[in-house]
Image (cartoon, rainbow, N blue to C red):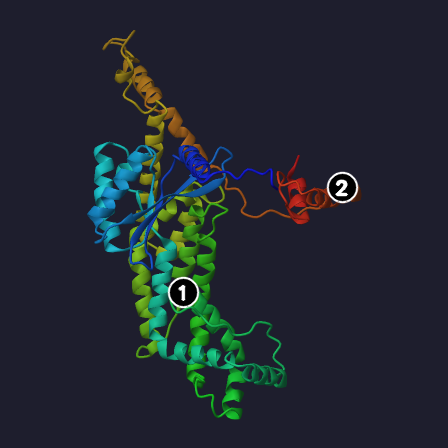
Amino acid sequence: MSNFKMVCRKTIHNDCLKEFVKEKRDLQVFFKTTDLWTSNRMMGYICIIAHFVDDDWKPQKRIVKFTAMETPHTGVAMFNTMVKFIREWNIEDKLFAVTLDNASNNGAMMKLLKAHLLNKNMLFCGGRLFRQHCGAHVTNLTCQAGLEFLSPIISKIRESVKYIRSSPARKEKFEEIVAQLGISYGKRPTLDVCTRWNSTYMMLDTAKEFRQVFNSLEIQDPNYTFNPSHEEWDNAATVCRLLKVFYEATNVISGTKYPTANLYLHEMLKVKLTLDQQTFEEESEMHSMLKYMKKKFDKYWKVSWLDLCIPMVLDPQFKLNYIEFRFDLEFGDEAIGMITKIKNVIQGLFNEYLKLNGNGLDPRSQGVDIEMGTTDDDPLATWDRHVTVRAQSGGEASLELESYLSKYMIKSTSDFRSRMTPETVEALVCLQDWIRASGNTQRSMDSVHDITVEGEEEP
């Protein structure tokens, strides 16, 4: 140890900065998400996250900016920060969409940023898809709106959970009653975090399984005074069934190791259908709660349904056929107009990508004489002109889009087959164990199930 020479602080500092610059250079790609956060020192920060696809077609995300912002956090101040950022990273021509929550300053900032980039012709489809509304944030707003109406019930259940967890004696008493009633539910009520609706849902969902235990505890322990009434327990159970759809949707669309854009429409339609199918008595508190939740969700749906459909069309499992099928069921006569809008956006997006590849341009701008060898007296002149213009304008390429949309969809699920010989199974199981034992971190630590499924898919 006496011969070890400690690296100096300056060297470490320089190495860190050098690595940062290198990684920054590698990450100068697609910008997508921003968020604002205030530290406990009351300093405002803006966080910018880039989402992109790497050379292996795997989705990636990186925090590319985390900088302090002076108050007030107005749309203009955020716009100035954003413009400085995209110039610093040289990605003005690489931005496709920005995902934000529904705060008013975000809306003001996006109007300024959209106008700025449109002025430079750097947005697809006139910026129609540039502003993306955060589905997880809207889900949170919708659920919080519903939970506001159940505040008295939630408070009672929260205090009940606190009570049984406040001392060993109370925990023992609770478990004693659980055993007496023969309840085999494995989980136990956990205390929620008030600002996180999903944790409140999990608290309610678990606590309702022990309503009989709490009822018995109320009789046996005079100090326990928080037990909800029979009607309140019923309402809590009803709300849990409703929130379960939101909870599952949030888990799906919040994934980071798989693409999520093509999954949003599925989950949002489930939420919409659940809200539309619920019915309660007109004057009941549950009816008021449902009405408020639907109002919150419908506001989001109106401004985002079209954006949610585009990734679905590009998913070979579903394409336009799925949307036509679902929208016909859900929206009836309105579906025709909605489908037309989707087709127009897809076609416009495709045409703009053609231009990037040198297609879709005016043939005259390419130096092509479309009238060479023809005269006005030639009956084929008009046809030749049409063929030339169509070829140079990407008409043939457009057939690619038509072909894609008209082909059969890929099945979203496939039958599981197991035709491997015992020798193959042995080789896979042993190899997996040897790789783990060797500590070779360069190879994927897939499970036996994953490896066998992959093996079945090989020709």
Q: How many neighbours does mark 2 have within 10 angstroms: few (below 14), some (14-19), or many (20 or more)?
A: few
The residue sitting at 41% across, 64% down in the picture is: 274
Q: Is residue 218 visible?
A: yes
Between 89 and 12, the residue placed more toward the observer is 12
Residue 297, given in percent of the width and then of the height, sits at 33, 60
Residue 2, given in percent of the width and then of the height, sits at 60, 41
Residue sitting at the far front:
2
Residue 122, given in percent of the width and then of the height, sits at 28, 33
The residue sitting at 30% across, 37% down in the picture is: 86
Which corner quadrant holds the C terminus? top right
Q: Secondary structure at mark 1?
A: loop
Q: Are marks 1 and 2 in contact (CB under 8 Å)?
A: no
Q: Is residue 412 left or right of residue 83?
A: right
Residue sitting at the far right:
423
* Mark closer to the chain start, 1 or 2: 1
Q: Give the amino acid at mark 2.
A: Ala
Numbered circle sitting on residue 427: 2
The residue sitting at 31% across, 35% down in the picture is: 88
Label 1, label 2: how many angstroms apart (C-alpha)? 47 Å
| 104 vs 30: above or below | below
The residue to which callout 1 is attached is 196
In this view, the mark in front (1 or 2): 1
Q: Give the amino acid at mark 1.
A: Arg
Q: Secondary structure at mark 2?
A: helix
| 197 vs 209: above or below | above
